[in-house]
Image (cartoon, helix red, strand yellow):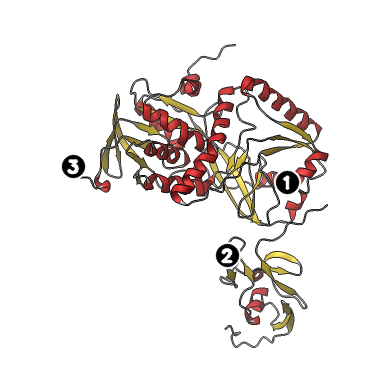
């Protein structure tokens, strides 16, 4: 029985599995390309990495030893202004994007030396693409940032970094997607599915949907989904914790890798990394303490602020920490997209990756992100 | 708008809500003093500037934020009164004090 009512539609041009930042950005991009797209969202039983995101648009620490990742990340930061403007125009939602550049703090001389080497190596690997950065000594950094602590020996700075509100971004992508005619289905975890070249079906929310394209953007869920589509996505969780202070009048002119002040005035302290399985409920005091301590060593005045919230969430990590993008060789039309930087990479996901998926082929620049890189036996 | 319930505890502690003296029983909270003071708001929210008074009285809603004895953004419902305490309105986001 055919009907044009969207709620009863079952045939689409593309099905995106996963309604977080990655899936929503790709779905938005596909819909904007004119593809009738179905966005399946598992619901609140999902791990919801997008809800726990710190909110950086971060370039300066991404892709050492992997220049293709550095370029992809930089590319996304450069797509961000257009994406934010486009979302604002279509939905009226301000993603709170600010890209004034960003800094990484060095405490002690050794950290400054290590960071200097790191940044020099980043620049060397960037080749003719270039990589603008400065290592700035504490005396000068004091003029850029308020109330830096005495242990700070310096900072690294690049002009590419910034931040945004992950929740406003997610909301804007969803509104933008449905506003363009996309079909969003919540509480629709994928049950079974079938795969043939450019011909897929997916059971979700008690219904069967078909499309010639399917995009797996289910975060950690991709590990189990990918093999069903002739793909592989060996991602594992890495827990990060975040502390949030009460709102204070704006002091920080730019974000740091572990500390940012939101548009509303809250200070967010983050960047912890631990292996804790799928546990997002437990907060570990020793990690919270060390995060708070480092924040106070950078900016002693933070010690006066009350912490009003804390949470943990799970990053989606491939074995080498880089994103995974693939098209299935066995079943062309099936794609994977995995990363731990749903905010940073929203720009390229919506503006570059989605058009590639719509066209049916990933650009050669993405070939190094294929999960096939994990199949190569390590050489001595 | 708010009256204390009839109780034997005498209002023996004098505090200041803004500049107005208010007498409350020992053990009362600063938020109770705010309500008894009869003012229209104790804070304005940082983002939209909406006026607020104490609401939940149990440390959850943060609508009773006040500057108490010079410390900004304190939850008045979680603070017990002391003689001479100064409870001042919290106007928007607090200022973090950066040492020069």
In depth, the one of A348 and A112 nearer the eye is A348
Please report the residue visible at 77 percent of the width from the left and 57 percent of the height from the top: B97
- In the image, is residue A289 above or below residue A368? below
- Secondary structure of residue under mark 1: helix
Q: Do badges 1 and 2 share one subunit?
A: no
- Given the current orientation, which residue lies at the most extreme left position? A1
- Which quadrant holds the N terminus of chain A? top left
Distance (Cα) linking label 2 and label 3: 52 Å
Q: Which mark is residue A135?
A: none
| A187 horizontally vs A296: left or right | left
In depth, the one of B55 and A343 nearer the eye is A343
The residue at which mark 2 appears reads as: B60
Tag 3 and tag 1, C-beta contact below 8 Å: no
| B3 horizontally vs A231: left or right | right
Q: Residue A2 carries which label?
A: 3
Query: Are there few (<14), some (14-19), or many (20+) residues within 10 Å of tag 3?
Result: few
Letter of the chain that mark 2 sits on in the rendering:
B
Is residue A343 shown to the viewer in this render? no
In depth, the one of A122 and A89 nearer the eye is A89
Q: Position of residue B13 (x, y in %)?
A: 74, 82
Please report the residue visible at 60 percent of the width from the left and 11 percent of the height from the top: A380
Between circles 3 and 1, the one closer to the viewer is 3
Q: Do badges 3 and 1 share one subunit?
A: yes
**Count the marks: how many?**
3
The residue at which mark 1 appears reads as: A293
């Amino acid at each position: 029985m055919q009907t044009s009512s969207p709620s009863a539609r079952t045939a689409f041009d593309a099905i995106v599995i996963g309604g977080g930042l990655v899936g929503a950005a790709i779905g938005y991009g596909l819909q904007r390309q004119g593809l009738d797209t179905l966005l399946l969202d598992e619901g609140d039983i999902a791990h919801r990495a997008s809800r726990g995101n710190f909110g950086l648009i971060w370039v300066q620490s991404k892709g050492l030893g992997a220049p293709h990742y550095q370029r992809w990340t930089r590319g996304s930061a450069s797509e961000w202004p257009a994406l934010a403007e486009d979302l604002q125009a279509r939905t009226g939602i301000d993603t709170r994007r600010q890209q004034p550049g960003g800094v990484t703090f060095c405490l002690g001389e050794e950290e400054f030396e290590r960071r200097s080497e790191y940044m020099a190596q980043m620049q060397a690997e960037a080749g003719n693409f270039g990589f603008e950065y400065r290592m700035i000594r504490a005396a000068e950094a004091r003029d850029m940032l308020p109330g830096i602590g005495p242990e700070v020996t310096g900072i690294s700075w690049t002009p590419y970094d910034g931040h945004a509100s992950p929740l406003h971004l997610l909301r804007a992508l969803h509104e933008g997607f449905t506003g363009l005619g996309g079909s969003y289905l919540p509480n629709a975890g994928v049950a079974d599915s079938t795969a043939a070249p450019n011909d897929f079906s997916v059971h979700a929310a008690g219904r069967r949907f078909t499309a010639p394209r399917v995009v797996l953007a289910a975060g950690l869920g991709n590990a189990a989904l990918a093999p069903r589509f002739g793909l592989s996505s060996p991602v594992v969780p890495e827990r990060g914790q975040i502390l949030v202070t009460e709102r204070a009048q704006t002091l920080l002119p730019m974000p740091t890798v572990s500390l940012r002040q939101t548009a509303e005035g809250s200070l967010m302290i983050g960047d912890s990394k631990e292996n804790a399985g799928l546990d997002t409920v437990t907060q570990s005091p020793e990690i919270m303490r060390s995060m708070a301590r480092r924040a106070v060593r950078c900016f002693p005045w933070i010690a006066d602020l009350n912490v009003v919230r804390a949470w943990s969430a799970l990053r989606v990590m491939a074995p080498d920490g880089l994103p995974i993008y693939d098209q299935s060789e066995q079943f062309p039309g099936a794609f994977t997209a995995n990363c731990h930087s749903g905010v940073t990479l929203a720009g390229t996901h919506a503006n570059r990756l989605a058009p590639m998926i719509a066209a049916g082929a990933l650009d050669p620049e993405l070939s190094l992100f294929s999960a096939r890189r994990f199949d190569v036996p390590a050489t001595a | 708008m708010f009256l204390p319930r009839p109780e034997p505890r005498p209002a023996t502690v004098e505090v200041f809500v803004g500049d107005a003296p208010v007498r409350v029983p020992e053990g009362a909270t600063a938020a109770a003093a705010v309500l008894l003071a009869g003012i229209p708001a104790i804070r304005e929210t940082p983002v939209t500037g909406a006026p607020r008074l104490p609401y939940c009285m149990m440390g959850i809603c943060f609508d009773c934020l006040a500057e108490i004895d010079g410390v900004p953004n304190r939850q008045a419902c979680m603070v017990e009164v002391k003689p001479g305490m100064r409870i001042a309105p919290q106007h928007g986001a607090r200022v973090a004090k950066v040492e020069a």
